[in-house]
Image (tube, coloured by chain):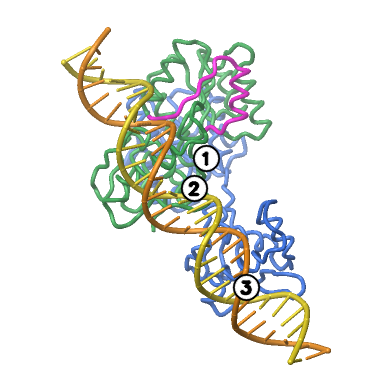
Chain colours: A blue, B green, C yellow, D orange
DNA sequence: AGGGGGATTAAGAAAAGATTAAGATGAAAA
DNA sequence: TTTTCATCTTAATCTTTTCTTAATCCCCCT
């Protein structure tokens, strides 16, 4: 875990650096706002610890600049001010936490741990087959960057095929996974919906992805 | 945004409930640890506010049980203790923040905003989608610089949609995050409020941002 | 030529969604 | 406390989209 500390008071910065390094964090230190901002922009940190009052450029300014530039790194603001106003401003500008000086070593470390465990990367639940992309969360399918306007059942059908890419699926399989129990098992509704899907997914493009497996059923696969 | 408050002191819980509801949050309240835990396990909350000392089961125990069960809902711990020890314990058990009683209203709200904002996206207290801007702190929405006069529930609905930009949300999802536990789950009230919101957000403009995902629900997205 | 998949299409049925109006509710003002 | 006003919910009606049925077409094989 890599942490950038921006703090101009040498005594304090050395102390914090030592505390963090004892915990095996990789720590970079900047002693003024301008160089702190530069480092934060260039390098990829897991956490920034910013003092509020700094020479050149204060912590709040660094923070808002970073957020404008879409930098999502968690930020812990450090301050000697105890005013409610400042704290609210800091948090609303995009800080994730706020710590008033002086603080106990253990409190600092607990806060750091909270902010570092955050990388709850949201797994983008999407499937890609050749130039076809299926975003399961947004319920959007695109091919060659072009949005396909699929009806609910069409999307469900595509989703089922795509989660079994390359696998030949029987009509019964498809029927039982994409339709509910009340559907007539002798109807040709799967064929019809495959046709609908092809009209949108394959017809406008040269590469066909939805393939017929004669005597069996259908499958989807990159060529 | 739906919040569960677990606090046994009636005076305080009523006060907090009022403060939060003024901000258009949907608030459920539990007055002891056991029922609080049950609610937290069953319902989908965006934030839990837990008092440390509670009858039946204390806040820390609720927290650790939830984390064992893989519930990742953000947690704000409330406490009258100011001890460093307790705070460290709370944070390390999985709390995301910690607030010592007594606290200022504005501080509580700032903390709540931090914990409610989108974990993946840039952390600021406003959301922009195309020319639509939503100020989560001031509870103001503007489009093309023009102020939209949204009713409380309309704003809450827009806020929920916007924090999940691009994602198709089911009516049940929406109902459970924008309304509290006493709403009738079979009513069409979501549809109606979507219509209200559209009248203000989309109708006067050419680009439609609030989209229907047939068979699923709704989503908000830039075109 | 006939038969067995399979593909396609149109039309009506069914489901889902949009819109409104009216009454209920609840908070602020008088 | 009563009145007023904005907001919310219910329920009915209208509109749009989606789904299924069933008829026809197609193509390959023997």
Do residues under tags 2 and 1 come within 8 Å of each other at their CB atoms?
A: yes
* Disc 2 to disc 1, C-alpha distance: 9 Å
The residues tagged by marks 1 and 3 sit, at their Cα atoms, a distance apart of 34 Å
Position of residue A186 in the picture relative to residue A46 (left or right): right
> Marks 2 and 3: CB-CB under 8 Å?
no
Residue drawn at x 49%, y 26% as measured from the top left: B182
Closest to the camera, between mark 2 and mark 1, is 2
Q: Left or right of B182: which side holds A182?
A: right
Q: Is mark 1 on a helix, strand or loop?
A: helix
Label 1 environment density (alpha carbons within 10 Å; few <14, some 14–19, many ≥20): some
Depicted B189 relative to depicted D30: above or below:
above
**Residue positioned 41% across, 32% down in the render:** A9
Query: Whole-Å distance between the Cαs marked 2 and 3?
Result: 28 Å
Q: Give the residues drawn in magenta, as a range.
A: B24-45
Is residue A58 shown left or right of residue B45? left
The circle drawn on residue B148 is none
Where disc 2 sits, the SS reads strand
Percent from the top left, x then y, of residue A193? 60, 66
Chain at numbered mark 1: B
- Which residue corresponds to the image point at 38% horizontal and 30% vertical from the top-left? B24
Q: Does the magenta stretch include residue A201?
A: no
Q: Is residue B211 above or below residue B184?
A: below
Per the image, label 3 sits on a secondary structure element best described as: loop
Residue at which label 1 appears = B173
Q: Circle 3 is placed at which residue position?
A: A209
Q: Nearer the viewer, residue B136 or C21?
A: C21
In the rendering, which numbered label is found on residue B217? 2
For residue A167, what is the image quadrant? bottom right
User: Mark 1 or mark 2, which is nearer the start of the sequence?
Assistant: 1
């Amino acid at each position: 875990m890599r942490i950038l500390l921006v703090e101009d008071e040498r005594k304090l910065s050395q102390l914090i650096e030592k505390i963090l390094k004892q915990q095996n964090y990789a720590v970079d230190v900047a002693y003024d706002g301008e160089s702190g901002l530069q480092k934060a922009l260039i390098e990829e940190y897991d956490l920034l610890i910013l003092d509020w009052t700094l020479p050149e450029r204060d912590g709040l300014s660094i923070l808002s600049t970073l957020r404008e530039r879409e930098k999502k790194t968690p930020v812990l603001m450090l301050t000697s001010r105890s005013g409610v106003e400042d704290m609210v401003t800091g948090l609303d500008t995009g800080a994730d936490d706020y710590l008033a000086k002086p603080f106990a070593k253990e409190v600092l470390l607990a806060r750091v741990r909270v902010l570092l465990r955050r990388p709850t990367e949201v797994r983008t639940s999407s499937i890609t087959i050749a130039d076809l992309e299926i975003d399961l969360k947004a319920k959007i399918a695109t091919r060659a960057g072009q949005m396909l306007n699929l009806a609910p059942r069409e999307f469900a059908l595509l989703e089922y095929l795509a989660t079994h890419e390359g696998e030949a699926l029987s009509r019964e399989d498809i029927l039982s996974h994409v339709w509910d129990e009340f559907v007539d098992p002798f109807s040709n509704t799967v064929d019809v919906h495959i046709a609908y899907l092809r009209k949108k997914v394959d017809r406008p493009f040269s590469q066909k992805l939805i393939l017929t497996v004669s005597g069996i059923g259908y499958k989807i696969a990159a060529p």
